Image: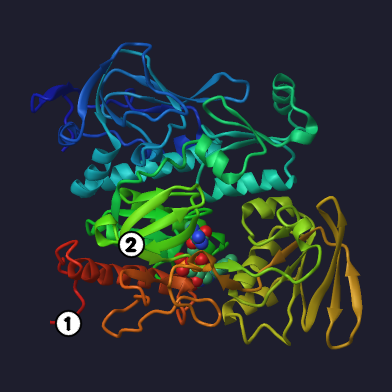
Amino acid sequence: MRRDRPHLVSGVHKVGRPTKEAMPQSMHPMIEARREQMFPVLEPEELDRLARFGERKSYAAGERLVTTGEIAPGAFVFLSGRADVTQRGREGHSELIVTHGPGSFGGELAQLSDRPSLVDAIATEPVEAIVIPPHRLRDLMVEEAELGERIMRALILRRVGLLDIGAGGPIIVGRADNRDVLRLEGFLTRNGHPHQRFDPLTDPCAHTLIERFRINARDLPIVLCPDGRLLRNPGDVELARCIGLVKAIDPDKIYDVVIVGAGPAGLAASVYAGSEGLSVLTLDCRAFGGQAGASARIENYLGFPTGITGLALMARAYNQALKFGVEIAIPDEVGGLQSGAAEAGRFSLMLASHERVRARAVVIASGARYRRLDVENLASFEGSCVHYWASPLEGRLCAGQEVALVGAGNSAGQAVVYLSSRVAKVWLIVRGPSLDASMSRYLVERIAARPNVEILTETTITALEGHDGILEAIRCLSVRSGEETKRPIRHLFLFIGADPNTDWLAHSGVTLDDKGFVLTDMDPRRALETNLPGVFAIGDVRSGSVKRVAAAVGEGAQVVAALHAFLAEAGDKPAPRVNTGRS
Ligand SMILES: Cc1cc2nc3c(=O)[nH]c(=O)nc-3n(C[C@H](O)[C@H](O)[C@H](O)COP(=O)(O)OP(=O)(O)OC[C@H]3O[C@@H](n4cnc5c(N)ncnc54)[C@H](O)[C@@H]3O)c2cc1C
């Protein structure tokens, strides 16, 4: 029940019932629209319950609570006083995002995962607050289910808000259609990290930065990180390290399980293993979500009758894994797997960063990678004009143009449906005689209803033409008539299947099938286990698996029971009670 009078709560702190005037104030319309959920004002008894998770601290007016680019001490629960949360604006000055007052809490997803803050927070009046460090914030989510749910929702919505207003992340200076700009933007977008792009063709701020740092046009793009560091056309890993997405891995720690791949299979295994008390490290060389993260709209995943974008579904799973204390390192590529002595952790994984990780058990969830077209100069157009994703980024890039798309499976169908609402025309190039054999009925019908999609069956691409990474035309051969046609196309999308990501297992001793997928279930008592005891495989990378999100998620859940059984048998952990239906 809400109370109106100031009162004392368990002697921990004195706080009045938050008034409308005391509620977090924001200047952004998007934030205003979702204010209630984004910035809930907690009841005194709720503040009281939160007190045990943190430490009470005082801040003087003008004192900094949080600094952009630095790891904050935790989330703040405000008992009295006020603090402004600001972002660093385009011209370098601060722009107000929200003002916190008594009863509100400050923080966003960065504080859940111990990552550098995306905003600044400064006390505008003397502040009394409970500061909850990241590991206790995760405890809170689990121990205080209802309150934890509200706080988690607020943290997620705040990140969505920051993504929406582009606050707090790095600034990329470069042309919107430059291949490295697209790569960097794609990397940040897929990892749910806010950023801004200044295009020198249209943005005076870009010129200011180029002049200030004396950058030659040839050296673009540059990236300005929140901590002030300047990177010249960085790789994904260099950028991730600069903005604090990846941290050094403790070489002495032995994880119960290391999961390779943060697609649906790897994230499901992470959530179940983390929630059941195992210490988990999940590694991915690119972004969370895997192939599913590339899906414009998943319509056949249980529980989402209106469909959901792959990125939204996977972002939820990623945050859920963080909530259960799973350590996630992205981008960190695993280059090899070695077996060793049980005391030393039994398995050792070598990373591309030259770090080593030790684990008692390993889950291979490295999925599959897109197949490339067998055309001589393909590589020179990849990243700028040849795409393997159809996300809003590519949608914007191709708006109003004619594009070509090769493929006949469901992923191709989804991309056609998505792109056709953004581009002038989609030429759908199909090797077989129709879509019926390979694409779900609902997608075939949806494509048929789009007037701006033309299907070229029994057709293959024979050549790509263009200069300096800019595609100008494609040549197509009709297998039926033998006729070759040239079409002016600037953007080509390829959805022609995938091969397993198992190169990194080359010298591991793990047995693969003749197509390179991981063989499991050699011993019927050990579901999902490979020929190496303690090494499991799930999802698309597994030989014979059903290549679907739900199947990958199911195997991610199932493998945790097998992991428990293995760790218990090896004497590493007592077996928990996992319901398998057997008595
Ligand atoms: C465009 C598209 C749309 C789709 N739409 C649907 C749909 O609507 N419904 C449906 O059910 N299915 C759909 N699918 C299929 C579905 O996405 C896959 O079956 C599912 O993603 C498989 O999950 P996974 O976790 O096994 O592997 P993946 O999703 O492939 O994830 C594997 C992860 O492992 C990482 N990895 C690989 N090698 C390494 C390494 N050496 N070190 C570290 N990390 C590594 C990768 O970066 C990747 O993130 C679609 C696929 C695509 C491409």
Which residue sits at x=35%, y=69%? 535
How many labels were placed on the picture?
Answer: 2
First of labels 2, 1 by sequence position: 2
> Callout 1: helix, strand or loop?
loop
Q: Mark 2 — residue?
A: 340
Q: Is residue 316 visible?
A: no
Front residue of this view, candidates 164 and 577:
577
Percent coordinates x, y for residue 384 in the rendering: 74, 52
| Mark 2 residue's CB less than 8 Å from ligand 1 | no
- Residue 494: mark: none
- Which of the 4 quarters of the picture holds residue 434? bottom right
Q: Mark 1 — residue?
A: 582
Side of 411 where 493 appears, left or right: right
Q: Is residue 494 visible?
A: yes
Q: Which numbered disc, 2 or 1, marks the residue closer to the eye?
A: 2
Front residue of this view, candidates 256 and 339:
339
The 10 Å Cα crowd at callout 1, few under 14, some 14 to 19, many 20 or more, is few
Front residue of this view, candidates 197 and 531:
531
The image quadrant where one finds the C terminus is: bottom left
Side of 391 where 559 appears, left or right: left
Percent coordinates x, y for residue 171 in the rendering: 61, 33
The 10 Å Cα crowd at callout 2, few under 14, some 14 to 19, many 20 or more, is few
Percent coordinates x, y for residue 29 in the rendering: 51, 34
Which residue sits at x=46%, y=27%? 68
Q: In the picture shown, does residue 580 fall above or below 383? A: below
Distance from label 2 to label 1 (Cα)? 33 Å
Which amino acid, mark 1?
Answer: Arg
Whether residues under marks 2 and 1 lie with C-beta atoms below 8 angstroms apart, the answer is no
